[in-house]
Amino acid sequence: MIKFERVGLVARSGSEKVLDSLRRVQQLLQRQGVEVLMEDTVHNLLQDYAGPSYTQAQMADRCDLVIAVGGDGNILGAARCFAPHGVPILGVNRGRLGFLADISPADIDVSITQVLRGDYTTEEHFLLEGEVSVKGVKEVPCALNEVLIHSAQMPKMLEFDLFVDGTFVYNQHSDGLIVSSPTGSTAYSLSAGGPIMHPSLDAIALVPMFSHSLNSRPLVIPGNSEIKIVVGSHIGTNAKISFDSQLEFEIEPGESLLIRKKKQKLRLVHPPGHNFYGVCRSKLDWASRLGDA
């Protein structure tokens, strides 16, 4: 019995590796009798596919499952569209690390068949949304990994005030601040010295970037907190706000950014045998380090 009957295919890259996996996934789905919905980008990549194509917004109202082929960046983009509609995402990894896209090319046939037949686990990941005004227009984009605020005139330092739930926390001079979800704790936040958090945690990490203070350390706060960052006017530097390094906005001195947890969550689908600690051992090379000790 097929658990998912209408499956969407999304991808961002046209590399030969991605194309090879896209064709294999498409052929597998068709052999299983699953209706395949192609994103516009995928339709253009698979030039021999003659069926209709859809935008991600159109797919969100039609799919039972979305398979994202590529790296984790592909899932980050898809999460912003499909999470609000409750459509789960399954990742096939053709990128470098693959913390989110965990099916290897060699396991496509076996793992996707297991998922289609209902043998899988589901993880819920919350997203962060940031409220920012650009030229008087309020924007509320979201991010799965992190929201980053940094100086718009690199390498110039940024001054800002941080508030959590209306309470002043600190004034800081630094290159910026990473506001990370648990999902993003193994991404940019990790590179900046932030803590690794299990995806199930209801917490947010605030990770300073090269702070002009020896006492500045990562801070983990409750997931339901509202974070307010006010750009200082003393230095007179504009700030850039980045959402998963895919969406970017600029704000001026004296303006603020509000960050909170998004109500709708992303549902990530994993084949049998997936566990977070196993992924960390594999991707962060923990196993070999233990073996060498």
Image: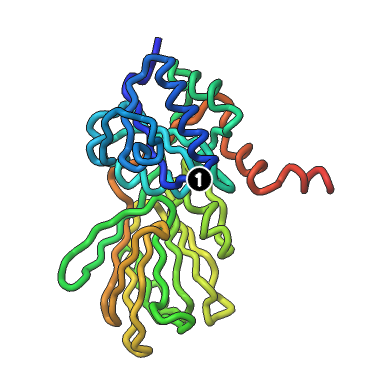
Left or right position of 99 against 226: right
For residue 192, above or below residue 3? below
Tell me where residue 230 appears, x and y as whole percent. Answer: 32, 75
Instruction: Work out which residue is located at the far top of the displayed protein and give it.
Output: 1
Residue 10: name its quadrant: top left
- What residue is at 43 percent from the left and 19 percent from the top? 116
How many labels sit on residues?
1
The residue under label 1 is 15
For residue 117, above or below residue 57? above
- What residue is at 51 percent from the left and 33 percent from the top? 21
**How are the residues colored?**
rainbow
Instruction: Work out which residue is located at the far right of the displayed protein and give it.
Output: 293
Name the quarter where the N terminus is drawn. Answer: top left
Tell me where residue 122 appears, x and y as whole percent. Answer: 44, 30
Q: Nearer the viewer, residue 44 or 161?
A: 44
Left or right position of 286 against 2: right
Tell me where residue 257 appears, x and y as whole percent. Answer: 30, 68
Q: For numbered disc 1, what is the local secondary structure? A: loop
Instruction: Work out which residue is located at the far front of the displayed protein and give it.
Output: 48
For residue 177, above or below residue 189? below
Tell me where residue 291 appears, x and y as whole percent. Answer: 81, 43
- What residue is at 50 percent from the left and 19 percent from the top? 114
Q: Nearer the viewer, residue 191 or 26?
A: 26
Q: Amino acid at mark 1?
A: Ser
- What residue is at 44 percent from the left and 79 percent from the top? 172
Decide: few, some or many residues near mark 1? Use Cα within 10 Å; few <14, some 14-19, many ≥20: few
